[in-house]
Image (cartoon, rainbow, N blue to C red):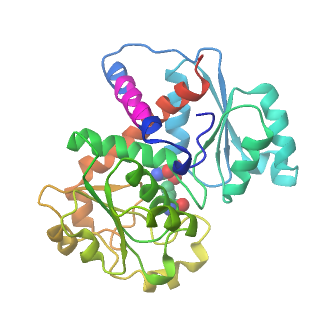
């Protein structure tokens, strides 16, 4: 594993290794055991979109590992004035030990990886959010003990989260059921991948997808960059919500995950959110531990 660009690139073994290391790092951090294994290493963090969790968890994570995080707002970089990503990659490779990037196009992240010589971590694109999905899988495993055979249900938009959860869930041998309006399906490459797995199903009916689920997951109806479509999407996604009815269709001990930020009253009711807040904020915390595992694996001395 040289980069973390999307879940599709990871094997079941890679994911298991990251989750095991994340559990270990979490244990060490909780017990005051220092693990400054990235002393002397630097991580550049390029943000072309807003962030609370990703920025803070990567910054704190690098600090706890003994390394230096450098926050780079895309608006302040020459890349924001048109310097090609190929040149940016070659320059930054001379200074840094790794780059985390949050941007719009997956192609930009792939171009950094192709042209640079250091590990690239996708901190969210329109296509994928692998850091979040690793944290979700870590949290689900923490609560349920294992992943294989569990039913994961995602209700909502065929966005970066749905794309990455489908791939991550299927790679971990989970049953994956998604519900989305017909015109908001996941990416075609993800659908092709999923079509080869009998454990995958896609429907327009949220209750169908939720039936017997161990984990219910949702995300905003309009992602970053889609603010102009918010009104149209509010209509298209009405009913694609985690609420009492959907919870009743799932297993009685079903857990809920939400990558946050959440829009109460849209993709999840305030009641469902608060009833499952513990799991949701454990998920947010696990961003820190899962990403530290990724950093150690990619930037650590082999
Ligand atoms: N879930 C997530 O990636 O949050 P931020 O947008 O706050 O980083
Ligand atoms: N799908 C959302 C996830 C935010 C963490 C977005 O891309 O805005």
Residue farthest left in this picture: 252
Question: Which range is magenta?
Answer: 16-25
Query: 124 or 81, which lies in front?
Result: 124
Viewed as shown, does residue 195 lie left or right of 66? left
- Whole-percent x, y for residue 82 in the image: 87, 54
Residue shown at 71%/56% (left/top)? 107
Query: 45 or 13, which lies in front?
Result: 13
Viewed as shown, does residue 105 lie left or right of 18? right
State the image quarter where residue 104 is shown. Answer: bottom right
Query: 274 or 18, which lies in front?
Result: 18
Viewed as shown, does residue 274 lie left or right of 264? left
State the image quarter where residue 103 is shown. Answer: bottom right
Classify 48 as above or below 31: below
The answer, for residue 159, to whether it is visible in the render is: no
- Whole-percent x, y for residue 223 in the image: 53, 66
Classify 61 as above or below 284: above
Residue shown at 25%/76% (left/top)? 208
Residue shown at 58%/34% (left/top)? 1
């Amino acid at each position: 594993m040289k980069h973390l660009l999307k879940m599709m690139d990871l094997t079941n073994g890679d994911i298991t290794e990251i989750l095991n290391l994340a559990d270990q790092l979490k244990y060490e951090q909780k017990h005051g055991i220092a693990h400054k294994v990235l002393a002397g290493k630097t991580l550049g963090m390029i943000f072309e979109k807003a962030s609370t969790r990703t920025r803070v968890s990567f910054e704190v994570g690098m600090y706890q590992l003994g390394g230096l995080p450098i926050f780079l707002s895309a608006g302040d970089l020459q890349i924001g004035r048109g310097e090609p990503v190929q040149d940016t990659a070659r320059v930054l490779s001379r200074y840094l030990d790794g780059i985390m990037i949050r941007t719009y196009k997956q192609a930009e992240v792939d171009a950094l990886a192709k042209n640079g010589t250091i590990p690239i971590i996708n901190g969210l694109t329109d296509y994928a959010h692998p850091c979040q999905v690793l944290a979700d899988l870590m949290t689900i495993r923490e609560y349920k003990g294992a992943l294989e055979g569990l039913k994961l249900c995602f209700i909502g938009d065929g966005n970066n989260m749905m794309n990455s959860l489908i791939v991550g869930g299927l790679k971990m041998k989970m049953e994956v059921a998604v519900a989305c309006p017909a015109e908001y399906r996941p990416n075609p490459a993800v659908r092709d991948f999923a079509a080869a797995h009998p454990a995958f199903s896609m429907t327009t009916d949220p209750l169908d997808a939720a039936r017997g689920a161990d984990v219910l997951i949702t995300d905003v109806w309009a992602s970053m960059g889609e603010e102009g479509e918010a009104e149209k999407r509010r209509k298209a996604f009405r009913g694609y919500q985690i609420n009492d009815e959907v919870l009743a269709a799932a297993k009685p001990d079903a857990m809920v995950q939400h990558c946050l930020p959440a829009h109460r009253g849209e993709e999840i009711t305030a009641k469902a959110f608060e009833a499952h807040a513990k799991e949701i904020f454990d998920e947010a915390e696990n961003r820190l531990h899962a990403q530290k595992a990724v950093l150690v694996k990619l930037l650590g001395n082999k």
